[in-house]
Image: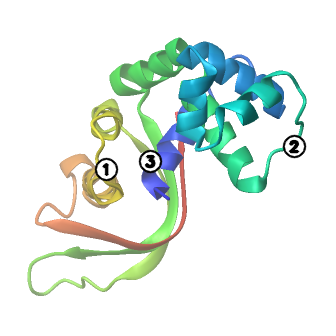
Amino acid sequence: MSLFGDGLEKAVQKAFTRPAPKSAGAQMRYLVKQLGGTKAVAQMLRVSQRTVERYVKDQIKRPRADLAARLEREVKKRWQPQIRAKARAKAASTGGIVIDTRARMGYTAPIGSTDQDRIRHLTVALPPVYAARLFDAQEQGASDDELQQIAAEALREVYFQDGGRRAGSLEEVRFTDIEHLEFDL
């Protein structure tokens, strides 16, 4: 489970203008239309083609919990791609992204200053350049650690250094033991 990747995805999903299909049958029909057939959907969801056909015809109504989760995830991943792209583009060009987190943070700084890790709750508006970096990295399949590194750099610059007005000698921010993480556009 990818904490940063899922958080970015949830932020983008808030921009949806219509709700995604809710019932298993409607979700299955949507995926069949998107992927062009029941065979492709069956392979993606790791079920038989006949099972997919039965959901499409509403002969089966309630999927097992693991299948329901995969079904919902795959539908939301494909739902309203233009709206998703517009939301990402706006965040990357003008809007920026807000990160709300409660995590242990520490930093590397010159001798004589305290670099003790401590739990902090931060809600910080990150500039569009960091939103663009996060979304670009996510699209290129970056790991959660890489996304976390980009977020840590953004927090160093925006929160700890206040855009260059303080803590200029701060070298690195450590971002660990994440208790809560949420993004908003």
What residue is shown with label 2?
Answer: 62
Residues at marks 3 and 1, CA–CA distance in whole angstroms: 21 Å
Which residue is drawn at the image coordinates 18% and 67% (left, top)?
172
Q: Position of residue 158 (x, y in %)?
A: 31, 50
Which residue is drawn at the image coordinates 54% and 36% (left, top)?
43
Res. 57 mark: none
Which residue is drawn at the image coordinates 32% and 51% (left, top)?
147
> Label 2 is placed on what type of residue?
Arg
**Which of pointers 3 and 2 lies earlier in the amino acid sequence?**
3
Res. 158 mark: 1
Secondary structure type for disc 3: helix
What residue is shown with label 3?
Answer: 5
Secondary structure type for disc 2: loop
> Label 1 is placed on what type of residue?
Val
Q: Position of residue 64 (x, y in %)?
A: 79, 52
**Mark 2 and mark 1 in contact (Cβ < 8 Å)?**
no
Foreground disc of the pair 1, 2 = 2
Foreground disc of the pair 3, 1 = 3
**Which of pointers 1 and 2 lies earlier in the amino acid sequence?**
2
Comparing 63 with 137, the one in front is 63
Q: Is 147 displayed left or right of 33 in the figure?
A: left
Vertical arrangement, residue 147 with respect to residue 136, above or below: below
**Which of pointers 3 and 1 lies earlier in the amino acid sequence?**
3
Quadrant location of residue 32?
Answer: top right
Comparing 6 with 51, the one in front is 51
Vertical arrangement, residue 76 with respect to residue 105, above or below: above
Q: Position of residue 180 (x, y in %)?
A: 56, 64
> Label 3 is placed on what type of residue?
Gly
Q: Is 7 displayed left or right of 154 in the figure?
A: right
**Mark 1 and mark 3 in contact (Cβ < 8 Å)?**
no
Vertical arrangement, residue 91 with respect to residue 83, above or below: below
